Image: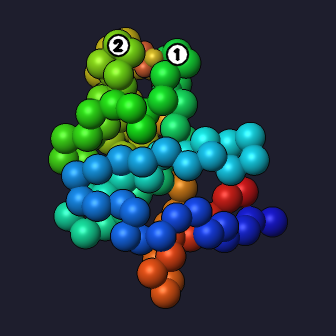
Amino acid sequence: MTQWLDVAARDDIPDDDVIGVDLGGKSLALYGVEGEVYATDNICTHGHARLCDGFLEGHEIECPLHQGRFDIRSGKAMCAPLTEDVRTYPIKVEDGRVLVELP
Ligand code: FES
């Protein structure tokens, strides 16, 4: 059973920016790119670093700790030292709010 959770205001996520949101034990990173919003797990799959503290370039987020990069559209790990993709989540925007589908 999945659920759509209201996680942020659309206006909180400007283009070329990333924010972190904490939802009862889970942390998500929300990205704005070219008018679209994307969501991934916020914790890097390599170590304990928050992707929202990283550097967003185009559709790639660079981890602040060892500079691993993920494609935020697919979650795909793009380079070493990453070996595991990061989880992505479906998004929809309704009435100025960002909703994320969580399993
Ligand atoms: Fe992210 Fe190492 S913790 S690349």
Left or right for 31, reference 90: left
Residue 75: x and y, percent? 42, 42
Q: Amino acid at mark 1?
A: Gly
Of the image marks 1 and 2, the number of the one nearer the N terminus? 1
Above/below status of 53 relative to 21: above
- Which quadrant of the rendered structure holds the N terminus? bottom right
Q: Are marks 1 and 2 in contact (CB under 8 Å)?
A: yes
Mark 1 C-beta closer than 8 Å to ligand 1: yes
Residue 85: x and y, percent? 47, 32
Q: Residue at x 74, y 65 (%)?
A: 2
Residue 41's image quarter?
top right
Q: Residue at x 20, y 64 (%)?
A: 34
Q: Amino acid at mark 2?
A: His
Residue 88: x and y, percent? 50, 49
For the residues labelled 1 and 2, the Cα–Cα distance comes to 9 Å
Q: Identify which residue, 40 or 9, lies in the foreground.
A: 9
Give the residue number, with chain letter if any, for mark 1.
47
Mark 2 C-beta closer than 8 Å to ligand 1: yes
Find ligand 1 in the image and state its quadrant: top left
